[in-house]
Image (cartoon, grey):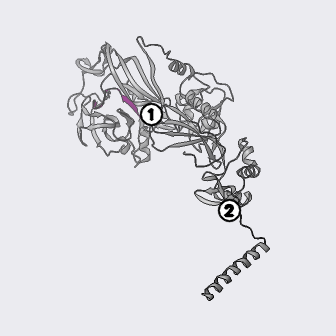
Amino acid sequence: MKLFKNILITIFLCGVVLLLILFDHKVTVNNDINSLYKVYMHGNFLGLINSSEDLYSLINNEQKEIMKKYNVKQVYPPNGFNIVKTNTYSNDVLSVNSIYNMIEQEDAFTIKGYVVTLKGIKSAKIEENEANGDKEHNEDPDLDNDENSDLGDLGPGEEDSSEDVRIYVLDKQVFEEAINGFISSFIDTETLNNYLNGTQEEIVDEGELIEKLYFNRNITIKEAFIDVNNKIYTDSADLLQYLLFNEDAKINHYKVKLGDSLSSIAEDNNLNVSELLIINPKYREKDSVLKVNDDINITYINPVIDLVMDMHKIENVETMFTKKTVYDSNKAYGYSEITTPGVTGITRVTEQYQVVNGEANSEIIITDKEVLREAVAQITTKGTKGYINSGTGSYVDTGLEWGWPTNTPYKITSPYGYRWGKIHQGIDISGTGDGSPIYAAADGIVVSAGPKTILGWKAGNSIVIQHANNYYTSYAHLKFVSVAVGTPVKKGQIIGSMGKSGFATGVHLHYSISIGRPFDGKNGYKFLNPMSLYK
């Protein structure tokens, strides 16, 4: 028992001595709670700082070039930066300079602006999602033969993409001015205002109006913190150039010389006049007066977004008359006279079609038609009296009279000629409907037919026919092919049906005529404007 008491006394005395030592050395325990800021980058803790204000001030002081370049009053930390106020007993605080150096190594600094996102297809709705503008930046903003392409079905706006396009602007007004300029490139102000105000003139006998005007992508605008390594548009003219010509486009210009016209400038630069008017909206008519040294934009467009117009049109369409030849043995050989003049027919057609970035789509739908005047065939009488039979049979006229390859009425939705620097070596014919018959334009022999022909894969199901005098006709994008290679065909014979196979934007026939086998590099060939043979 005595031993136990001695142990207790010893323990007590040791405690007293320890307390005296601590008091003598003035050792104290920190009971103060500190209000500090936890700093994170991409979820990784960097350290504690005393003041968020000091950090933002330091960023501004160190990033004056960014402030000057974009004319902003505040530069912010990189995306992925997060700062959280916290209460802690810890005194392990870093300087704002240390934190600044760490985040500078992580990523680029940001400024406040707007992210314009182009997504989806065929929606004109423009939405605004305004951020609250809080000063603290606590999270990432949510943001075969190359020649065959000459078939010409690769015009602007014909490829849909599901990938979102993001455009960064300093101010919403920059985008609004640019998108208005984009619209003005394809539609004049009066027409646009009449559509928006519901004041389009009603169609009486002939005319057209816009049923719907929209972009092929949904547009959203959201305030965000933008990484300064991105291209940030501060000027609407620069943004308009991007919207029309895409990224990194080389803009080409031409200075008007004495004697120039829009037609001559377009022809010399592999454009058509309509295209030249699109990229030079200051000129509204193909006969606009030019001044020497006027600056003309001759760049091929490659739009980032498509402006689509659904059109409704009523027009009186001429139907070509057919040509027939009869032979009279009482008339001398060499005699030829039109004995019955041809008369064009007239059909009033109601059409629906799309215009994408100023160009009509390849497909047109005729919803109604009324025959106002029937066509009368032209009959030519030729004499055969005195013709000497050399043993080759009866008299044969070796001249070609071309038949039309589709039903009527029809519409030529894309003529022969240049389209944004590439020659369209034929015409696109539409309006007769999916599966409607395609006819041989003249007597001949089928030299290529099916899904894989000398026209290339873009032509889809196609046919090539050889005719007299080394003429060839080509028929592309067919739904069905009903003739085989080596088959002799007669003018007017059904050889297939209209479709949209291959690289086609809608139901239509691509029809071309060449002298020489098309795309025959050894023997040579030359495409003609088919309409030059239908006069």
Examine the image and state in which quarter residue 345 appears: top left
Q: Position of residue 148 (x, y in %)?
A: 41, 43
Q: Position of residue 195 (x, y in %)?
A: 50, 20
In the image, 399 versus 281, the foreground residue is 281
Left or right of 422 in this view: 260: right
Image quadrant where one finds the C terminus: top left
Q: Secondary structure at mark 2?
A: loop
Which labelled disc corresponds to residue 361? none
Which stretch is magenta? 424-439
Going by the numbered disc 2, the residue's amino acid type is Ser
Left or right of 51 in this view: 285: left
Examine the image and state in which quarter residue 453 appears: top left
Q: Residue at x 60, y 24 (%)?
A: 283
To which residue does mark 2 refer?
A: 90
Which labelled disc corresponds to residue 122? 1
Instruction: Give the CA separation, mark 2 to mark 1.
Output: 57 Å
Q: Is residue 438 magenta?
A: yes
Q: Judge whether 435 appears above or below 208 on screen.
A: below
Q: Is residue 316 magenta?
A: no
The residue furthest bottom is: 3
Examine the image and state in which quarter residue 266 appears: top right
Q: Judge whether 269 appears above or below 203 on screen.
A: below
In the image, 182 versus 140, the foreground residue is 140
Q: Are marks 2 and 1 in contact (CB under 8 Å)?
A: no
In the image, 213 versus 91, the foreground residue is 91
Going by the numbered disc 1, the residue's amino acid type is Lys
Label 2: few (<14), some or many (≥20) within 10 Å? few
The mark nearer the N terminus, 2 or 1, is 2
